[in-house]
Image (cartoon, rainbow, N blue to C red):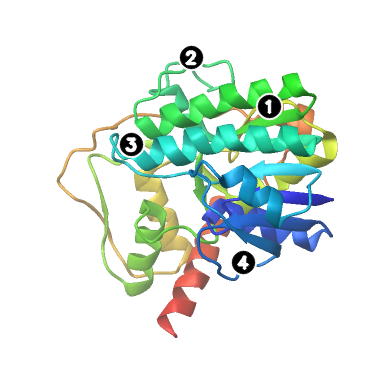
Amino acid sequence: MRIFLTGATGQVGRAISALLADHGHQVAGPSRHFRPVPGLYEQVEAYLGSADFVDLIGKGLQPCEAIVHTAASLSHDNYDPSISLTNCLGTQQIIKLAQIWGAAQLVYISSVPVIGCPLQHPITEDHPTQPATAYHASKLYGEHLVRLAEGNGCRAASLRLTSPSGPGTPENRILAVFVRRGMAGEPLRVLGRGTRQQNYVDVRDVAIAVESCLTKNASGLYNIAAVDSISNYELARTCVDELRSSARVEFAGKPDAEEGTVWDVSVSKAAQDLGYRPQFAIRDSIRAIALEQSHRNHQ
């Protein structure tokens, strides 16, 4: 299958590109700056948030049978225009491209926190939505746009991810910080009482879910998450144990604004429709991050 993948240089996109290519698919994608991406067969220089994006892609690439849209501005600034340009206008352009190409399948990467604060447990796809940031509002907007694509004969699925982990985890994320400090034997500091429970989905499981959508012609909204959530305190303890580290787990003496929040996410719908079964546990993600950190240390 020939697949157009946006965001191939990001953590999630790289994992998807590598898996799809490994399974025999041809993967092409846009890039603002050319750089090597494992599995990416062809690149076109184009910016998703520019008005001429569709024209540039049409001139530079042959039509693809499917589109996987992972690209997004991850800005925490609610007034950053890149959020609207990349996440909103960009998704509109992806929908337009799918229509022009007559693409049979579209997979859109969204985020479980579009719901805002968890009010119901477990968190299902029917949970009320109230995004707390411009970024999450833009992802919810994208979900609505993706539904419109189905009116043009394209099967479309939106995947709501929990916190991506594993290979490529940014160094400023809590899991990467814990791994880095654990490897160095430095204290792992936890905010508040460490009771906030997060769900970490390994990007390799995300890639498997995406391929399932493509092969099963999936349609609709799906949570993609790990089996269990884990508290920040237990996450720190697990890092120390998995790394066989002498590091201590300490309380930072600073409050956690999300103390006691639990991201208990149900994947039963994805299991039923997509055959989704997470294959990578939190310890697998920790090992992957540690391996990358070790390689950086020896460069």
**CA gap, disc 4 and disc 3:** 38 Å
Mark found first going from the N terminus, 4 or 3: 4
Write down the residue under mark 3.
195
Kindly report which numbered mark, 4 or 2, lies closer to the viewer in this rendering.
Answer: 4
Residue at image mark 2 = 128
> In this image, 72 relative to 255: left or right?
right
> Can you identify the residue that label 4 sits on?
37
Residue 242 position, x and y percent, is: 48, 63
* Measured Cα–Cα span from mark 2 to mark 1: 18 Å
* Crowd tier of the residue under label 2, counting other residues whose Cα lies within 10 Å: few below 14, some 14–19, many 20 or above: some
Q: Residue 238: horizontal and vertical position, in percent?
A: 44, 55
Q: Name the mark nearer the viewer: 3 or 1.
A: 1
Q: Earlier in the sequence, mark 3 or mark 1?
A: 3
Total marks in image: 4
Asked which quadrant contains residue 124, the reply is top right
For the question of whether residue 160 can be seen, the reply is no
Closest to the observer, 90 or 255: 90
How busy is the neighbourhood of tag 3: few (under 14 within 10 Å), some, or many (20 plus)? Answer: some
